[in-house]
Image (cartoon, grey):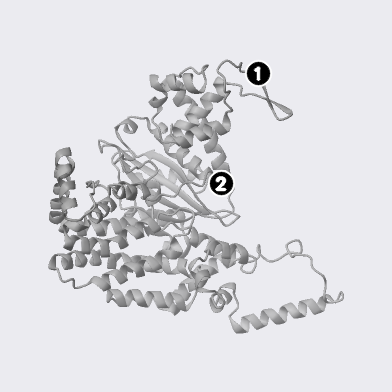
Amino acid sequence: MDDTEIRNSVDDVEMNESDNESVGQESRIGSSYMPTFQYSQQKMRQGLAKYISSSGQVYSSAQHARFEKFIQEYVQSEYSSLCLRTIKSDSLNYFNDMKRALVSELSGFNGTFSFSTNFWSSADEQLGFICVTAHYIDSAWMLQRRIIAFRMLEYPHSDTVIFQSIMDIFREYMIDDKVFNITFDDVTGSEAIIDMFKNTLQPPCGGQFSYMRCLCHMVNSMVQEGLKLMEAHIEKIRGAILYIASSSARQQEFSALCESRGLKYRELKPDFKDHWNSTFLMLASCVNYNAAISEFYNGKHDVFRSVALSNSKVYLPTSSGGLFILRYISKCFDKHRGHSIPEFTAVYEIMESKFKSYCESMLPSYCLAAAMDPRFNGQGLDFLVKDISEYLSMLLLNMDTKAIEARLHDLYKGYESKFAEKEKPTSDRIPKRKRFDDGDESAVEKFLEWRRQKEIKTYGPTELHKYLGVNHTAYMTNEEFQNFDVLAWWKDNALSFPVLSKMACDLLTVAVSAIAPEFVFSSTSGNQVLDYKRSMEPSEMLDCLFCMKDWEDARLRAQNWTDDDMVKYYADSEQC
C-alpha cells in the first residue's frame, strides 16, 4: 500500500496506540466517550474487494503471504486471508450492486449520452475486447464520464460483431434511445459499422454529426508516419543511450566527459516504443547530442504531445475546442513547411497529407460544437475556419459562416419541436418579485409581447437567432476570455435559452478523443492494459476490474490522465 492508501485507511480506522488494549475498550476524547474500532471480517471482505478492483490490482495480490503478515502485524491481528474464489466472488457482488445503481441512474437520465469506444487485444493478441465509455453533462452542468463495459468480442472481430456488441451494451443499460454521438478509435470506427449505427439509431441530421474519429488516434497515426521516416536517426540515439545506460562504468566515464565539457551530468534513459510521447521526451532529454533532431522535436513535435494532453481531459468539454486544435496544428505545418533539412520536409509532407484528410471530414462537427462556445458563436467560427484554410493552403467547401449557421438551424429545429412546449416558463418557475403593474395583467402581457417582437426584429424568431446575434464577449477582459468556463456560462444562461441549452448540452458532451479510457491501467513502466496476468482472467472479471476502477475514480473526480509521471521520469535523469 502506498502513502495515500495508508492515509485513507487511517481515515476509516482509528488505531489503538497500544497492542495490549482490547478491541471493545472505549477511549476518552476530551470529556466524551466514543467506541474504538470494531473489526468485522465481513466489512473487511467488502473493503478488500473494493480496494483490489478500484486500485487496478490483480486478485491474487491479497493472497500473498507477506500481505497477510503486514496486515496482521501492523494493521489488524485478527485478519485472516481469503481464498481467491472468495475474493473474486466478493468483487463481483460489489460490482453488480454498483452496476444496478448506475443502470438506474443512466436509464432515468433526462438527456442524451455521447460515447467513445476502444478496441483492445489480450497480451497474446488472440482475444479482442471492446471498451465503451459514456459521457454526459448532469443537471448541475458538470461533465461526467463512466466506463460502462469492457467486454470480450466473439471471434472473428467482424464489423457486425463489433456493432452488435456495442448495441447489446446500450440495451443492457437501457440507453439505446439516448445515443447522441459515438467517437470511434481506428478499429471500431469502420464505415460499415458507422452505417449500421445510422440505420439502427436514426440520429439527428441523418447522423452527419453523430459519429466522429478520435482526434488523438489521428494525431498518433500522423506522428507514427513521421517517426517511420525518422527511425534511422532515432535508432542511433536510442542505441547510444542504451550503450551508456547498460554499464555503470560507462555512466561514470560519461559523467566525467560531461564535466570536462562544462555540462551537467544526465542519466540518459531510453523510450518506450509503444508511447510516442516518451520518444519525444527521450530526444528532448538528450538535446545536446544531435542539434538537428533537437531542433525538430523541441520546436515542432511538442505540438502533438500538447494536443494529446489537452484532449484527454475528462471534466472539461473537448468538442468545443476541437476547432482550436485543428488551427493549432495547421499553423504548425504552415510555419515549418519547406524545412531546410530535406528529411524533415518529407516528414512534414506525409503528416500534413494525413491531417488534411482528417480536417475535411471532421470540421463540420467541430464547428457545431465550437458554436456553442459563446466566445466564438458567430464570426469567430469564420475566423478560425479561414485560418485553417489558409495555413493548409486548401479550399474548405461549404464552411463559411452562412453554411455553418444553416447546419446549426437544421439541428436546432429538431430540438425546438421536441422541447419548445416543455420548456415554456410556468408560474412556478418564474421567481416571485414585486409587481410593477398595479394588478393590470394586460400591461404585463403587452410589455412582454413588445419586447419579444423587438428581439425577433433585431435577431430573429428563435433562441438560436438571438444567441448567434449577440456579442457575448463585448465586456470580457483578456483574462476572462482565456479562463472562460463554457459549462458555467450555460448553467447561468439555461433559463434564457431553455431549448438551445439542451442542444448545447449534447454538443458539448461529445468526446473529441477516446484517449482517456486507454490509460485507466497504463503506467510509465510500460505495463499494458491487458498484461498476461489480466489476460488470464475471465471476461466478467475484467469487466468488473475496469468498470469498478473507473467508477471509484469518478466518485473521487480523479479520472483525468496526464503524462506527468513520464515527464518526471525523464526530468529526474538530470542529477544536481
Three-letter amino acid code at disc 2? Answer: Ser
Q: Which residue is mark 1?
A: 25
Q: Is residue 458 left or right of residue 29?
A: left
Q: Which residue is mark 2?
A: 107
- Residue 35 at what x, y percent from top left? 67, 24
Residue sitting at x 48%, y 29%:
49
| Quadrant of the drawing holding the N terminus | top left
Q: Is residue 190 left or right of residue 316?
A: left
* Residue 409 in view in this figure: no
Residue sitting at x 14%, y 56%:
233
- Residue 113 at what x, y percent from top left? 50, 53
Q: Is residue 181 left or right of residue 492?
A: left
For mark 1, give the secondary structure: loop
Quarter where residue 502 is shown: bottom right
- Residue 13 at what x, y percent from top left? 57, 28
Quarter where residue 32 is shown: top right
Three-letter amino acid code at disc 1? Answer: Gln
Mark 1 or 2, nearer chain start = 1
Q: CA distance from mark 1 to mark 2?
A: 47 Å
Q: Is residue 288 above or below residue 531?
A: below
For mark 2, give the secondary structure: helix
Crowd tier of the residue under label 2, counting other residues whose Cα lies within 10 Å: few below 14, some 14–19, many 20 or above: some
Q: Is residue 336 above or below residue 202?
A: below
Q: Give the tally of numbered discs.
A: 2
Residue sitting at x 38%, y 52%:
514
Q: Is residue 350 left or right of residue 130?
A: left
80 and 5: which one is in front?
Answer: 5
138 and 365: which one is in front?
Answer: 138
Q: Is residue 462 above or below residue 272?
A: below
